[in-house]
Amino acid sequence: MDLRGLECFLAVADHGSVSRAAAHLHMTQPPLTVRLQSLERELGVELLVRHSKGVELTAAGRLLAERARRLFAELAQTREMVRAVGLGTRGRLSVAVGHTVSPRLLARLTGSPRLGPDVDVALTDVSDADVIERVHRREAHAGLLHLPPVEPGQARHAGGRARGLEVAVVARDRLAVVLPERHPAAGFDRVDLATLADDRVVVADAVGEGLAAHVRTAWSSASKASATHHEAGSVAHALALVEAGAGVTLVPMEHTALVWPGLVPRPLRQHTGVVETAVCWRPDEDSPVLRRFLRGALSTPEPDVLGPALGRHEPDATGE
């Protein structure tokens, strides 16, 4: 049975007349009659009873009409599902997320307006090093992490782990300081790091080496390289230590919207390097959902694809 023959049969069943069905299908009666006769010959049963007022379905015809309607409904659903999968509006997206990446940025990148309600998103919170490894091992379609600072005149470098991956910046942010609300500098509009006491809270390198490097550079520029510090296992833990009186901490400005009562975020008086959040992915990953995610993630005011140190590694003449 071909689909066109079933479509013609259903039109006749729905309209109760060959002539009205032919008009609905934008065809003449003779070829429609041929279609119906061919279907009856193929099945070896009578499907329609012709009379002066039109046609009626036989028992076999009623069963075929019921099953055909179900078939066409499933075909329509399948057509929409296949189209949605191909367009990336249906499926699954797994993202390995560095511990220091802002939850608010995640919401913007993975929310329904971008990906659609039929995309299941799986987020895994890991260290920066594990972000790269999980994408390499195809345990995640993409990864998000903070990139380390770059000295003027130097090429960006993130080590051999990023070889073979595409990497691009999706967000840029400045550092801010978070202090206890009772801190003397909490009333200032901007805070000079050089005026702060020695105690500070930092996120450990093993947790987020990209952000940790930015924080070290900022403190070093403020002549605070040898200050006492406490290590935290996440940005949230760093904020908890600040509230507990362990010192102050530096975080990307994006995180300051999540600061709770008892803490005060303030911008810095001195210039610090811009903290870049990057997305990485395998260039041979063929997921339509990933492609849709990347189109949205890279539609930033200044999308910035990074240089060859982080880009795809092309083999040389020796194949290495």
Image (tube, grey):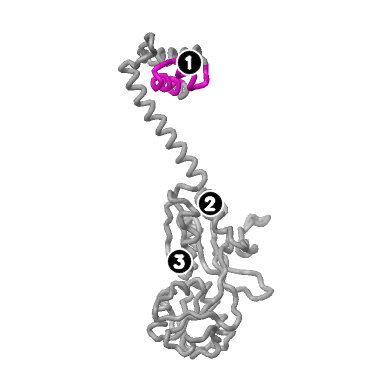
Is residue 289 positioned above or below 169 on the image? above
Real-space CA distance between mark 3 and mark 2, rounded to the nearest whole angstrom: 20 Å
Viewer-closest of 167 and 87? 87
Circles 3 and 2: CB atoms closer than 8 Å: no
Real-space CA distance between mark 2 and mark 1, rounded to the nearest whole angstrom: 44 Å
Amino acid type of the residue that numbered disc 1 sits on in the rendered structure:
Leu
Q: Residue 96 at what x, y percent from top left?
A: 46, 61
Mark 2 or mark 1, which is nearer to you? 1
Residue sitting at the far left: 59
Mark 1 or mark 3, which is nearer to you? 1
Label 2: which secondary element:
helix
Decide whether the magenta segment is chiefly helix, strand or loop.
helix
The residue segment tinted magenta is 5-27
204 relative position to 275: left or right: left
Q: Residue 64 carries which label?
A: none
The answer to which quarter of the image holds residue 69 is top left
Viewer-closest of 308 and 26? 26
Q: Name the residue under label 1.
A: 32
The answer to which quarter of the image holds residue 6 is top left
Circles 1 and 3: CB atoms closer than 8 Å: no
Q: Which residue shows up at 42% across the image and 84% down it?
A: 181
Label 3: which secondary element:
helix
Q: Does residue 281 show up magenta in the picture?
A: no
222 relative position to 184: left or right: right
Q: Which residue shows up at 53% across the image and 69% down it?
A: 146
Q: Mark 3 points at which residue?
A: 103
Label 1: which secondary element:
helix
